[in-house]
Amino acid sequence: MSRHLSPLLQLLLLFVFAIFCVLCYRTWLAPEYCGTTNFTCGTVGPKDNVPTYLEAEYEQGKTIFRNNCAACHAGDMRTYLTGPPLGGSEERWAEHGGKEALYAFTRNSQEMINAGTNTRANQLWEEWAPTVMNSFLNLTDEELDALTIYIDEVHTYHSRGQDP
Ligand code: HEC
């Protein structure tokens, strides 16, 4: 009996390992492509649905999200992490001051929470205290618009055919 694996078997093992590496990469390093409960995911990502005229903003939003928000907010925009999922934030703020209040909260959540006048901010603090969100005083409206586009696209992608 040979103590060595046949070359064909070695090649097969190498192939399986390569596939495993690709899946790991897509799941851990490119989280917006994969729901956290979905280990094997397709080759189509949310970016493929982004209309050409929004591509620059999508990319800008992605960079801002990864650098500032991804530490606490899940990359699939659906999962609870250190902070709540960001998908659908606009709708949740619609009756509580809309986009203006949402952007003000993102820039300085503690200020709004301490003021105590916005019911959505109060509600969030009730649920998440004592976890404090960072302040992002320097984010411009334009940057927050780009973030919103990115969040929406990724959220829509992950919500297709699933519960909201
Ligand atoms: C240190 C962790 C942390 C970071 C970093 C962070 N957040 Fe948050 N975020 C939270 C927590 C916790 C809450 C819940 C409210 C609270 O405790 O202040 C929250 C709440 C929110 C909400 C309200 C969501 C809702 O359902 O109404 C929005 C919007 C939001 N964050 C956006 C952002 C954006 C955009 C960034 C990046 C620019 C960011 N956050 C970075 C922790 C964080």
Image (spheres, helix red, strand yellow):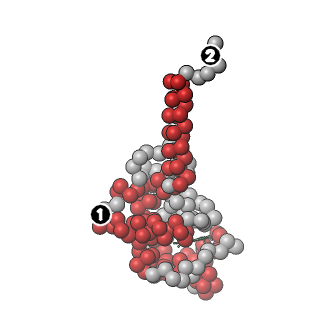
Residue depicted at x 64% and y 12%: 1
Q: Is residue 10 above or below residue 51?
A: above
Disc 1 vs disc 2: Cβ atoms closer than 8 Å? no
Three-letter code, disc 1: Thr
- Categorize mark 1 by other alpha carbons within 10 Å: few (<14), some (14-19), many (20+): few
Asked whether residue 73 appears in the rendered view, the answer is: yes
Residue 34 appears left or right of 49: right
- Helix, strand or loop for disc 2: loop
Residue to which mark 2 is pinned = 2
Given the current orientation, which residue lies at the most extreme bottom position? 115
Residue to which mark 1 is pinned = 52
Q: Is mark 1 within 8 Å of ligand 1?
A: no
Q: Is residue 58 above or below residue 46?
A: below
Q: Is mark 2 within 8 Å of ligand 1?
A: no
Three-letter code, disc 2: Ser
- Helix, strand or loop for disc 1: helix
Q: Residue 72 appears at what percent x and percent y? A: 60, 66
Q: Residue 136 appears at what percent x and percent y? A: 55, 79
Residue depicted at x 52% and y 24%: 7
Residue 151 appears left or right of 134: left
Q: Residue 5 appears at what percent x and percent y? A: 59, 23
